[in-house]
Image (cartoon, helix red, strand yellow):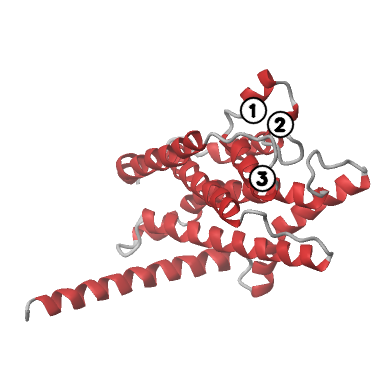
Amino acid sequence: MRNERPDVSAKLNKMDGYLQVLRALMLRDMRTRFGGSHIGYGVVVLWPVFHVFLLVGIFVFQKLPSPMSLDTATFIATGAVPCLIFQYISREVMKSVITNKPLTYYPQVKLFDVLIARIIVEIVTGFLALIVVFAVFFAIGIDPLPSDPFVAVSAYTAAIMLGIGLGTINVGIISFFPGWLMGYMLFGIVLYVTSGVMFLPSVFPNEVYEWFKYNPVVQIIEWMRLAYEPSANLTIDYIYIMIWTLGSLSIGLLLERFVVRKRG
């Protein structure tokens, strides 16, 4: 028993030290990316909110009807929110390696810590933006609560996991090809336009719709919309989404462990 107490104390001290490192990395990310002020961070939280309501404004101004029984604002939000959280995480995890590379020369800081810190920051930022979107919806008289909250949370979680998985793969790619940062940003634009944020892929002929469904983001968006309209004629291949999320995460972690660390 006497020997166990020092071991437990040492483990607790080590854990406390690790949490302090993560906290410092998260604060540094927020200060360097958001101008070092609460106002700067607020702008970044509000940016995806502005994105959502800009699309809503365009649809309303052009008098474009929602292709579902959902109102236009809810239809746009159910597509934009999961797509944006996926894109932000997958892109910013990759950028964190570039911006925080000098910190890894300190023995207390590992590349994996940098990735974890950025992932947490992006999840928190996305969640705060989601709260603001809900608040605006309530203020303008729209009920943003889904018919099936569990389905909505599951779809949102899947978007986060896919973002983490592809983000870690991106880290492995830029260790060989730094230009991939710009390439992925261009790829992200194409992915966003074709993922069904502003339209309903299921209205296309079955032959075309089947091609759309190879994109996991399309199915995650449909998953989210099912939470708001359970009777919609949408079929989700949950196994396919899980293969993408868990498979990409596994590949990304293997790249980080056996490729990125050695090159670093």
Marks 3, 2: nearer the viewer: 3
Quadrant where the N terminus is found in the figure: bottom left
The Cα–Cα distance between marks 1 and 2, rounded to whole angstroms, is: 7 Å
| Residue to which mark 2 is pinned | 201
Amino acid at pointer 3? Pro
Residue plotted at (72% across, 21% down): 205
Q: Position of residue 48 (x, y in %)?
A: 70, 56
Residue 41 is situated, as x and y percent measured from the top left of the image, at 64, 68
Residue at image coords 62%, 23%? 211
- Residue lying farthest to the top in this orientation: 207
Q: Which residue is mark 1?
A: 212
Q: Nearer the viewer, mark 1 or mark 3?
A: 3
| In-image side of 252 versus 194 (left or right) | left
How busy is the neighbourhood of tag 3: few (under 14 within 10 Å), some, or many (20 plus)?
some
In the current view of this chain or complex, which residue is farthest to the left?
2
Q: Are marks 1 and 2 in contact (CB under 8 Å)?
A: yes
Disc 2 crowd, CA 10 A, few/some/many (<14, 14-19, 20+):
many
Image-based side of 136 in relation to 227, left or right: right
Tell me: 22 left or right of 48: left
Asked if residue 197 shows in the view, the reply is: yes
Q: Which mark is residue 7?
A: none
Judge left or right: residue 235 versus residue 9: right
Q: How many numbered discs?
A: 3
- Gap between marks 3 and 2 measured at Cα: 17 Å
Give the mark nearer the N terminus: 1 vs 2: 2
Mark 1 belongs to which amino acid?
A: Phe
Q: Nearer the viewer, residue 161 or 166?
A: 161
Which comes sooner in the sequence, label 1 or label 3? 1
Distance CA(mark 1)–CA(mark 3): 21 Å
Q: Which residue is mark 3?
A: 230
